[in-house]
Image (cartoon, helix red, strand yellow):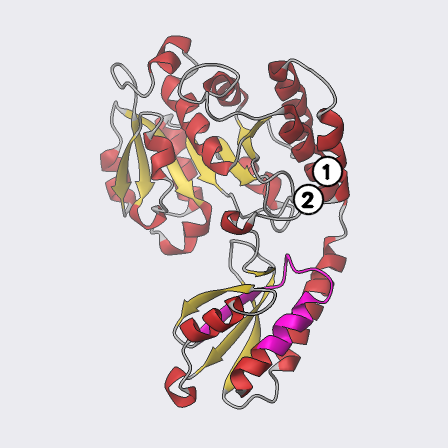
Amino acid sequence: MINGVGVVTVLGGSLMPPEVIAAMEEAGRYFIPLPELQKKVGARLAELLQAPAAMVTCGAASAISVGTAACLSQGDPAKLRQLPGREGIKYEVIQQKSHRSGYEHQMEMAGAKVIAVETREELLNAINERTGMLFFLNKGEPHGKISGEEFIKIGKEKGIPTMNDCASDAVPKENLWKYTKMGYDLVIFSGGKALRGPQASGLLLGRKDLIEAALPAMSPYGGIGRGMKVGKEEMCGLLAAVERYLKVDHDAEWKILEGRVASIRAALQKTKGVETAQYIQPIQNQVPHVTVKWDEAARNLTSQQVTEKLLASDPPIHVQRPGKGELLISVWMMRGNEHEIVGRRLKEIFSA
């Protein structure tokens, strides 16, 4: 298939570069104590990403779970073993209502009770002796009434750890250290998206004491995170991906993406009633996309019908459908001349 959606889990995330595949293949040849490797890789990642500490998780979602477990257990082995039990534990996690994303389950499985608030006043009133963590969804910043800076400030003043889920926000590369430097106690990135590491990998960055508390919350240790196994292949693969990502000429890559966008737009340039534009999302996946818009009634053609026709192509073409008479196309993960194929197919559909 042709991936016009981007780095999404359901389509396999991203494609791993040769350096990543080579690191995983080499790691697969040897036995090594995983806790020792995790600490060594974590130390190197922390150095590269200017963070106090780091660890590899089996995806960004597992980073939420083990990070939550670290905040709730506060480094106490007995409390960690007790989770998801709540007795004697600060188990409440506060987040903004506009930041609900469906990943609340990852906190709840660690024993958390998620409390939703909307305003700064509501946040302050919700904090009590049971509050164990404040959770922030980075892409939700424009939709909430409490900014990231204010969120951090309140957490510091109240002595409550703050977690920021930045899973798809590793572009530009400076974001990889931006949020820890802002003061978030824990920051999460996906390993299998912009970084182009193993799909089943993630990064948990932040306070050294919390990272140390998160490590035993995950396999090969027992407890709630036993099923969140990170192999030596994922650890070495993600480290290789980060090292590569920091060396890549991102300006050159950007020009390539803009060229693909221009190609698709040119294919539809003379199609009456169809408007195209280059679009860059405000936070998540900040790379050039193509928007295609038209009046469904005037053309007697819905965006649902267009996406169905694209999926019926050979090869199938997957794109996003944000609303009526609108497509959002990511060129980020396209290969070779795939952008030209997409442009031609769209022209055929709108010209029919």
Q: Which residue is mark 2?
A: 16
Q: Residue at x 69, y 26 (%)?
A: 44
- Percent position of residue 286, x then y: 57, 57
* SS class, disc 1: helix
Decide whether residue 342 is among the magenta residues. yes
Amino acid type for the residue under numbered disc 2: Met
Left or right position of 317 against 130: right
Q: Which residue is farthest top?
A: 78
Left or right position of 233 against 200: right
Q: Residue at x 65, y 46 (%)?
A: 173
- Percent position of residue 17, x then y: 73, 45
- Percent position of residue 100, x then y: 34, 46
Highlighted range, magenta:
326-345
Query: Between residues 48 and 112, which one lies in front from this camera angle?
Result: 112
Q: Which residue is mark 1?
A: 21
Left or right position of 134 against 263: left
Amino acid type for the residue under numbered disc 1: Ile
